[in-house]
Amino acid sequence: MSDTDPYDLDAYLDRIGWKGERHAGLATLRGVHLAHALSLPFENLDPLRGTAPSLAPADLMAKMVHGRRGGYCYEHNTLLRLALEALGFPVTPLAARVVAGAGTPENRPRTHALLKVEVPGEPRPYLADVGFGAAGALLLPVPLAPGAEHEGAGRRHRLARAAHDGPLELWELQAYDRRTGEWAGQYRFTEEPFTAADFEVFNWFVGTHPRSPFTRRPYLQRTTAAWHLSLDGARLTRTAADGTVTERTLTDEAAARRLAAQEFGIEVPEGQALLD
């Protein structure tokens, strides 16, 4: 069985609400990327149970397309890769070191998955990523070129070259923070291709290691055109499109489960607690 045999492009596009063209062009890449980002939530409920989620296409379809669940970067970007390849795009999986909040980024392992996408007729490939769980994450893909700023669906990003000692060019994706008026690094990566076997190892480590943040507390996210909603532990944060932030702390388990279903679109499995 090939990697794409259990994959149903029609069901995926219906789930994210994409009704546009189905050929390998820039408009399709941008439209599918944005539709995915605004439709499928980010969540780590499987790692909270000590289980690394399956990256098999059939399991991703059952969980995220046919079920009311989301996933984290390996799941999201595997699902997007399968869609883009089915639409005719050449796609190369990449891996990045998250630098947000890191004093010494080089000490962090490459644990984030992202995609390099070739677009017919375009001079440069594009960076695509629907799995970075943050209020400043990409909503639209950006060309793999340094310096230029890209406004996409209300967010601003740019790619910069980072200094390092390795033989490959090192890129840093940066996001503009409307609250501080400053650019902040999100992650760094090279264009070295990674395989499904690499991501199986990364997924197992991030999904099961006791020091992984994804095994220690719930982390749910949902993005709409008007706001970004995040549940980090018991702290609920809503970030409006203009950068306004409101926060509150959840204390009731039943209310948290209702919130997960109604606001995040996630059905928490029976018997799994969200709050300690």
Image (cartoon, rainbow, N blue to C red):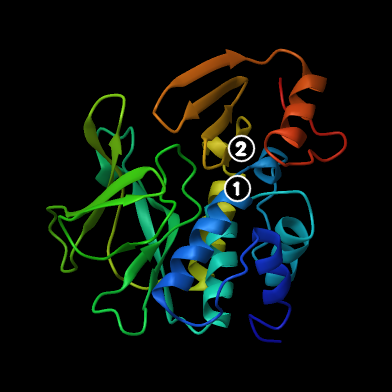
Instruction: Tell me the kind of residue under disc 2.
Output: Thr
Is residue 63 something one can see in this rendering? yes
Left/right of residue 224 with respect to residue 275 in the rendered view? left
Q: Dot 2, how many residues are within 10 Å of its Cα: few (below 14), some (14-19), or many (20+)?
A: many
Query: Which residue carries the number 2 mark?
Result: 215
- Placement of 259 over or under 165, stated as above or below: above
Q: Dot 1, how many residues are within 10 Å of its Cα: few (below 14), some (14-19), or many (20+)?
A: many
Marks 1/2 in contact by CB < 8 Å: the verdict is yes
Left/right of residue 162 with respect to residue 23 in the rendered view? left
The spot of residue 272 in percent (x, y) is: 80, 34
Query: Which residue carries the number 1 mark?
Result: 207
Q: Quadrant of the C terminus?
A: top right
- Which of the 4 quarters of the picture holds residue 182? top left
The spot of residue 52 in percent (x, y) is: 65, 52
Q: Earlier in the sequence, mark 1 or mark 2?
A: 1
Question: Which secondary structure, mark 2?
Answer: helix
Query: Mark on residue 81?
Result: none
Q: Quadrant of the N terminus?
A: bottom right
Is residue 72 something one can see in this rendering? no
The spot of residue 186 in percent (x, y) is: 33, 44
| Numbered-mark total | 2
Left/right of residue 200 with respect to residue 151 in the rendered view? right
Instruction: Tell me the kind of residue under disc 1.
Output: Gly
The spot of residue 206 in percent (x, y) is: 54, 48
Residue at image position (50%, 57%) is 34
Question: Which secondary structure, mark 1?
Answer: helix
- Which of the 4 quarters of the picture holds residue 271? top right
Which residue occupies the foreground of this view, 115 or 102?
Answer: 115
Residue at image position (71%, 22%) is 275
